[in-house]
Amino acid sequence: MPNFYDTDRAVAEYLLFHFAPPEVQMPWASGPREGVDFPVRCVTATFDTESVPSDPPGIRALDLGCAVGRSTFELSRLCDEVIGIDASERFIEAARRIQQAGELAYEATLEGDLLESLNARPPTGARPDRIRFEVGDALRLRPDLGTFDWVLAANLIDRVPDPAGLLASFEGLVRPGGQLVLTSPYTWLEDYTPRSAWLTKDGQHTTETLATHLRGFGFLRRLDLPFVLREHARKFQWSVAEATVWQRL
Ligand SMILES: C[S@@+](CC[C@H](N)C(=O)[O-])C[C@H]1O[C@@H](n2cnc3c(N)ncnc32)[C@H](O)[C@@H]1O
């Protein structure tokens, strides 16, 4: 069976999650409308954008586990260079198509085999020329990737087999003074992470154990980021990610 993130269903659901207008992401007035545009808020509600220099070389950013790339496009508004990396070839192929062709047609499920045709486009103000999308494993990044002013890992730590190893790698990726943003609903599942590697140790919540794995960072702040993932027009997953912001010492 292919990895879920390499399936047609995942590509369509994530294109909608990242690029559809808010009223398509959550068409119901009675639904949790504050959960739309999660990949936008992962950037705009977290990084300290006051610190963005106006002169080159500017900010170099990494979006690890970028999926189909919306947060990467958002980062490109603020940063001079952005690399988006994901393990899913299908996701990176879709992100590149949006970057290079300026649009990607896809079909979202309404119900059963009834589909709705939609188009994913780079958001207004994004700078596709500043972006590089790459297929890669967050736990085995290419050694010449360099270091970054900003690193975002949105909803990734509970989808890798070695979250502690991922957290340990950030020290080598973030420049001193740079910022690391982690978001996650902490949905620990043995499908992705062996139970022995979950970050809920000795009765502690994940937030508490994060600090013990991020020794080279100072904790800046935390916030809750709700998000809504549409499965079809009448079924949605509503989750609340916790975002934590860290500064490299
Ligand atoms: C829950 S999704 C989150 C995607 C996106 N950051 C967001 O917030 O919408 C997890 C993503 O991590 C990717 N992923 C899982 N394991 C990975 C790994 N070892 N290296 C890179 N990406 C990985 C998946 O392909 C998927 O795109």
Image (spheres, grey):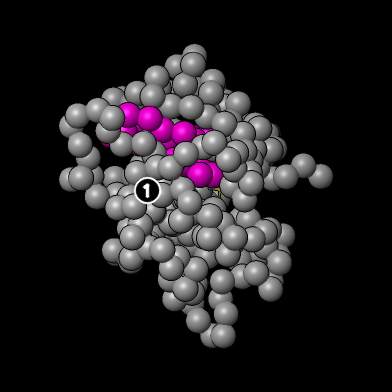
Q: Which amino acid does label 1 sit on?
A: Arg
> Does residue 70 show up?
no
> Callout 1: 10 Å neighbours few (<14), some, many (20+)?
many
At 61% across and 34% down in the image, what residue appears?
A: 135
Q: Position of residue 17 (x, y in %)?
A: 48, 41
Question: Residue 107 versus residue 166: which sits nearer the camera?
Answer: 166
Q: Is residue 217 visible?
A: yes
Q: Is residue 115 left or right of residue 55?
A: right
Does the magenta segment cover residue 91?
A: no
The residue at which mark 1 appears reads as 175
19 up-or-down from 204: above or below: above
Q: Which of 27 and 130 is in front in this view?
A: 130
Q: Give the range drawn in magenta.
A: 62-84
Tell me the residue at 43%/53% (across/down): 227
- Residue 67 magenta-highlighted: yes
Vertically, is 22 above or below 194?
above
Question: Could you tell me which quadrant the C terminus lies in?
Answer: bottom left
**Coordinates of residue 188 in the picture (x, y in percent):** 61, 66
Helix, strand or loop at mark 1? strand
Residue at (44, 76) in percent of width and height? 208
Spot occupied by residue 137 in the image (x, y as percentages of width and height): 63, 44
